[in-house]
Image: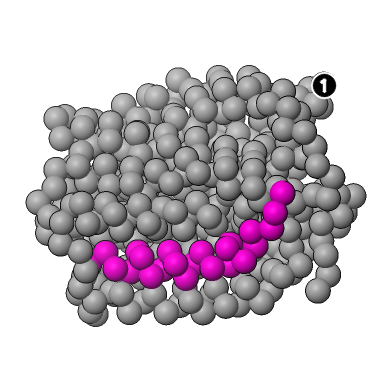
Amino acid sequence: MMDLTDRNAKDYKPVHVLAIAGGHFIHDTYSAFVAPLLPLIIERLSLSLMLAGSLTLYLQAPSLLNPLIGYLDDRFNFRRLVALAPAITASLMSCVGLVSSYWSLALLFLAAGCSIAMFHAPAPAMIARVSGNRVGKGMSFFMAAGELGRTIGPLVAVWAVSVWTLDGIWRVALLGWIASLILYLRIGGISSAKHTRVPLSAFSTVAGRLFLPLMVILFARGFLISSMSLYLPTFLKGQGSTLLFAAGALSIYELAGVVGALSSGTLSDRLGRRPVLFVAMLSSSILMFLFVNVSGWYQIPILVALGMASLSAQPVMLAIVQDILPDHRALGSGVHLALSFITRPLAAMVIGALGDSLGLGTAIWWSAVIVFVSVPVVILLPRPEIAQQ
């Protein structure tokens, strides 16, 4: 099978990009089960909003391993583990209905988080390697596939519950195993690693200038994503919506995010990474303010615009990391994803605490304030040519 690890390769390889993106789609379909099932979990286990929000901490805690996974993947080839991840994640997330306590669910999410980390650290670097000099475009397809999976996921979860009840949704795990088999057969020649070993000191030289401002952006974005992706069904159900409407609204938000993710990376190839990211963050905060001030069907067009804006930022940020750290791509994406996954559950717990005391609407409003305040930090992100000096 063809080896794609030549560091001078500049060709965009659509077949390999689509293979990895397809794996991302199936994988994230299952990781999106949490939000639509959260109202049922809260009811079954008698959880407070803060305790329910803390469940994401266990799901995201293994992201602490992302830098280590990326570091090792830059030296070895983890493509087989990447291929296996959709099957493992599907199996674990489909067993949510089989647990009967908070702590057993926490352990289940912790195991699923390990599988999620094993996929998400190496996969963006693999995308960068097969995208040549069109990294933004490749990252757009990769992230759009993930957003599409998170769009389908809530609908699959609600459909499975309606057919088999919460106890029987383990049956939908089969598709994850089929996806892993196909992915394993398709990505045998892809590696995120380079033949030339660049000292780790070269990474640390630019990492501070990149990840300090990026961490601020990711923390603020954690409030945005947690408000909309995690608490949206619970918020709408609290307003009197049915579970089906709430899950449908989440899918609309995620589907709009597919469009945003698909276009933002390509736009950033042409217009620059920082301007596209700046506009995405600013418009997201404004749309969040609008969302909490309307109700019913008037929320849908705002959700569409908000999904396009808020979920378009991730491909651009990943492309920035790949641009600035071309010799440590997997490590860079691992650190980025670790920061993202760490800040998000912390934001989810803060939102949950605010929601318990002040109401979810107020918590979402304050989340919009945090996002708005973080927007100027985008200009502090280094350009690739500056970071390499």
Asked whether residue 262 appears in the rendered view, the answer is no
Is 101 a magenta residue?
Answer: no
Which residue position holds label 1? Answer: 389
Name above or below for residue 99 compared with residue 274. below
The magenta segment is: 75-97
Residue nearer the viewer, 305 or 325: 325
Instruction: In this rendered view, identify the residue nearer to me: 30 or 110.
Output: 110
**Residue closer to the observer: 258 or 291:** 258
Query: Circle 1: is it few (<14), some (14-19), or many (20+) Cα within 10 Å?
Result: few
- Our reading of the magenta stretch's main secondary structure is helix
Q: Amino acid at mark 1?
A: Gln
Q: Secondary structure at mark 1?
A: loop
Quadrant assignment, res 81: bottom right
Q: Residue at x 44, y 30 (%)?
A: 219
- 314 to 85, vertically: above or below: above
Q: Residue at x 68, y 36 (%)?
A: 320
Q: Is residue 219 above or below residue 167?
A: above
Q: Is residue 180 left or right of residue 294?
A: right
Is 303 or 326 nearer to us in this picture? Answer: 326
Please state the horizontal and vertical placement of residue 277, each as a whole percent of the image.
60, 34
